[in-house]
Image (cartoon, grey):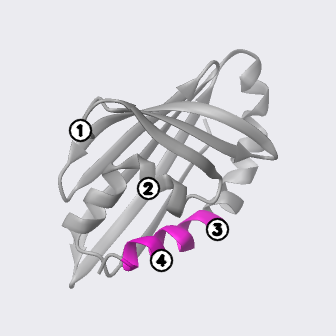
Amino acid sequence: MPSIARTFTTSATPTAAFAYLADFRNAEEWDPGTRSCERVDGDGGEGTIYRNVSTFLGREVELTYTAVALEPGRLVHLRGGRDGFEGHDRFELEPSGAGTQVRYSADFSFSGLAALGSPVVGLWLPVLAAKTLPQLRRSLDRLS
């Protein structure tokens, strides 16, 4: 199961960081692979469903994300999936001075024919994180 975890600090407060990350439509700003992300059901709380269209390794992929756990100022957990794939994105937030320490982790599991791509995804994750996390930090820092 490919996974990755990275930690960084932003000048945004935990409250501001949580509000921004909990609204997954903002992935259009901070995730370089996201082409569109729209809320399709829910009010933004737990159980809210998003339709995300991203490019990954040169292919356009549509995923359905659900807000699994939202703990204001502390945790955003989103589960994304489609046939043969399930991913969990977690943002754990802790106060750090006037800002926030963000621990981002992503875990991916594959089944069926999609499992053949698992090793490639594992190799690609550090490259993807190197692109995504600086953009995510900049987006959060703009909130302060």
Indicate the amino acid at tag 3. Ala
- In the rendered image of this protein, does residue 131 appear above or below residue 3? below
Please name the amino acid that badge 4 sits on.
Arg
Q: Which mark is residue 45?
A: 1
Q: Position of residue 7 (x, y in %)?
A: 43, 68
CA–CA distance in space, label 1 to label 4: 25 Å
State the SS at label 2.
helix
Which type of secondary structure does the marked residue at label 3 adopt? helix
Residue 115, above or below 121: above
Which comes sooner in the sequence, label 2 or label 4? 2
Q: In this rendering, which labeled residue sits more in front, label 2 or label 3?
A: 2
**Residue 35 versus residue 29 in the image, above or below:** above
Residue type (three-letter) at the residue carrying disc 2: Asn
Quadrant housing residue 41: top left
Which mark is first along the chain, 3 or 4? 3
Circles 2 and 3 in contact, beta carbons < 8 Å:
no
Q: Which residue is mark 3?
A: 130
- Determine which residue is flagged by label 4: 138
Residue type at the position of mark 1? Gly
Instruction: Report helix, strand or loop for mark 4.
Output: helix
> Which quadrant of the view contains residue 95?
bottom left
Q: Residue at x 28, y 73 (%)?
A: 100
Q: Earlier in the sequence, mark 1 or mark 3?
A: 1
Q: CA distance from mark 2 to mark 4?
A: 13 Å
Q: Quadrant of the N terminus?
A: top right
Q: Earlier in the sequence, mark 1 or mark 4?
A: 1
Span shown in magenta: 130-142
Quadrant showing the C terminus:
bottom left
Of the residues tagged 1 and 3, which is closer to the observer? 1
Q: Which residue is mark 2?
A: 26
Front residue (pair 39, 59): 39
Give the image location of residue 8, x and y in percent. 43, 73
